[in-house]
Image (cartoon, rainbow, N blue to C red):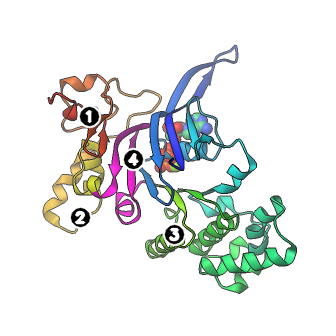
Amino acid sequence: MRMLEVRNLTKRFPVEDSIFGKPTRFLTAVDDVSFGVERGAVFSLVGESGSGKSTIARLICGAYKATSGEILYMGKPIGRTKEDYRNIQMIFQDPDASLNPRKNVFAIIEEGLRIHKLGSSKERREKVMGILESVGLDRLTVKKFPHELSGGQKQRVSVARSLILQPELLVLDEPTSALDVSVQAQTLNLLGDLQKEFSLTYVFITHDLKIVSQFSDYVGVLYLGNIMEIGPVDEIIDNPLHPYTQGLLESVPQPDPSKKAMNEILKGEIPSPLNPPKGCPFITRCPKAYEPCTEKPGLTVVGDRLVRCHLYDTGGN
Ligand SMILES: Nc1ncnc2c1ncn2[C@@H]1O[C@H](COP(=O)(O)OP(=O)(O)OP(=O)(O)O)[C@@H](O)[C@H]1O
Ligand SMILES: [Mg+2]
């Protein structure tokens, strides 16, 4: 059984109210998305801004209700029990927004233990100190307030706060994108170490395919709420099949100047999800678009992967 199973997940947001108070239009942020995550694996979701990554994270953590589809955790619909909320923790992109500025580091990290009424005050103190060490923060940090910490330190506090409840699954929504490049690398290394040390399972969200290649087992590439390609990360990085994945990979800065011209693939604006293109979501930017693409492709099995592209339709085009 897979730890997390996302099946045909769709989320629509109402965007306009008529004078009768009924929504007249819907924005499809997540469109029939399915994936599974094995225990102990790192599954990454990659896509540009607005592709629906954070919406999926919030759906998994129970902050949003799905329009349709289901999310199973250990084979059961997620969020039904108090344990689920303990076992699944989320780390946000912006630690400033998620750390209470009026609480010191000790109180922030200890809070989950208090809410779940776990341990005596002495046991809680020991746990906080232990976890502080695991995330590489000095013991003296406990007395500090968020504004006294650097960005990297704040994100370590966020990680400590999530780990204190000994979760099984961490949903990390662009956990390093607010950090300087050097701190990003340190934080990623830390997250990698913690994943092994605590046998954690990650859903790791990023817009940066570079990070994915060093960090995950499986990857799903999202575009306008749709999975465009999904499969083992090594295969996708070595040989991206979907033109969008190819574009994302080429837009990773290349040390080789002869490859620069290829960065042109992803030019053009992402269409508004309020007014998505008819047919393939990627049709307006795809260098390989041809007639069949005016109809939306389904997901085709190619080896260990699924690809949403008419170029790989069974029967060959
Ligand atoms: N609460 C909401 N109400 C209405 N629309 C929303 C809401 N949350 C997200 N959206 C829309 O859903 C789409 C997906 O948003 P989401 O935040 O999931 O994207 P993302 O991939 O996380 O982007 P980013 O990389 O910028 O964080 C966007 O078009 C966004 O405007
Ligand atoms: Mg987001």
Q: Residues within 10 Å of mark 2 (few under 14, many from 20)?
A: few
The segment highlighted magenta reads: 206-234
Label 2 vs label 4: CA separation? 22 Å
Q: Callout 3: helix, strand or loop?
A: helix
**Residue under the point 38% across and 34% down:** 271
**CB of residue at label 4: within 8 Å of ligand 1?**
no
At 28% from the left edge and 37% from the top edge, which residue is drawn?
301
Q: Residues within 10 Å of mark 3 (few under 14, many from 20)?
A: many
Q: Is residue 289 left or right of residue 174?
A: left
Spatial CA span between label 3 and label 2: 26 Å
- Determine the CA span between mark 3 and mark 4: 20 Å
Front position among marks 2 and 1 = 1
Query: Mark 1 highlights which residue?
Result: 309
Q: What residue is disc 2 on?
A: 254
Does the magenta portion include 208?
yes
Mark 3 and mark 2 lie on one chain; the one further toward the N terminus is: 3
Marks 1 and 4 sit apart, C-alpha to C-alpha, by 14 Å
* Kind of residue at badge 1: Cys
Label 2 sits on a secondary structure element that is loop
Camera-side residue: 106 or 93?
106
Q: Amino acid at mark 4?
A: Gly
Residue 220, disc: 4
Comes first in the chain, label 1 or label 3: 3
Magenta stretch contains residue 296: no
